[in-house]
Amino acid sequence: HIEVQVMADHRGHVIHLGERDCSIQRRHQKLVEETPSPAIDEKLRREIGRVAVEAVKAVHYRNVGTVEFLLDKERNFFFMEVNTRIQVEHPITEMVTGIDLIKEQIRLAAGHPLSIRQQDVVLNGHSMECRINAEAAHKNFAPAPGRIGAYREPAGPGVRVDAGIGPGSEISPMYDPMVSKLIVWDADRDQATARMLRALAEYEIEGLKTL
């Protein structure tokens, strides 16, 4: 599952910010995302980026969005859909490009032209995101709502947590069981993986089932 982040302004200018690999899923819900994709080389990155840009140009799309594809074993890719919004996994693109996607979305929605050219987009290092879900693994990962007790986020260079929770927060059974997002960046995939494992081990969320 490969998706391409795009940005388009009202003047018809469109660029892409590389791809994200969202292949690790459960019940068609993404769990772990990373960029760059380990399944994509530079040649394929240019081609899938070109197709994504042409697709949104064809429908005169404006603003930030994501073009999603499926990639097969022969490295053929097939169009799935366009998500016309910021997605949960957008921070990993921010981490490797240094571009604030929320800021750009607001600028584009206000009618401003793109402030970035395609040649300005440089992918630096590797980033991963894990969705932290309130789920009970021993019950086939059924949602496990409840009240958070002690809460401590991991920290340090290259570690980011996007969350709106804290000690005493109530996780409702009425919504998605995702409670936060843990994002890491490092120079390459192996180092990013090691940093993610360390950050996961340091993440303390009591009162909920998260494994």
Image (spheres, rainbow, N blue to C red):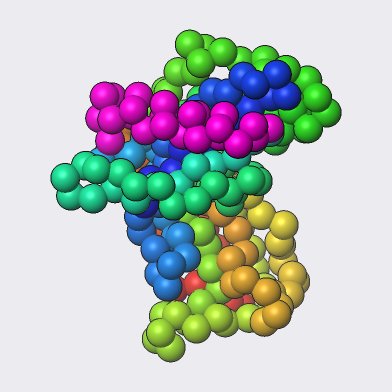
Instruction: Judge by depth and name the residue closer to the eye, 147 or 137.
Output: 137
Residue at 30%, 44% (x, y): give it: 77
In-image side of 114 versus 51 (left or right): right
Counting from the top left corner in percent of width and height, residue 22 is at 40, 51
Counting from the top left corner in percent of width and height, residue 6 is at 55, 32
Residue 158 visible in the displayed image = no
In-image side of 71 versus 158 (left or right): left
Residue at 70%, 19% (x, y): give it: 11
Q: Which residues are magenta?
A: 40-62
Residue 123 visible in the displayed image = yes
Residue at 68%, 33% (x, y): give it: 63
Q: Is residue 8 magenta?
A: no
In-image side of 209 versus 106 (left or right): left
Q: Residue furthest right?
A: 110
Counting from the top left corner in percent of width and height, residue 25 is at 39, 63
Q: Is residue 47 magenta?
A: yes
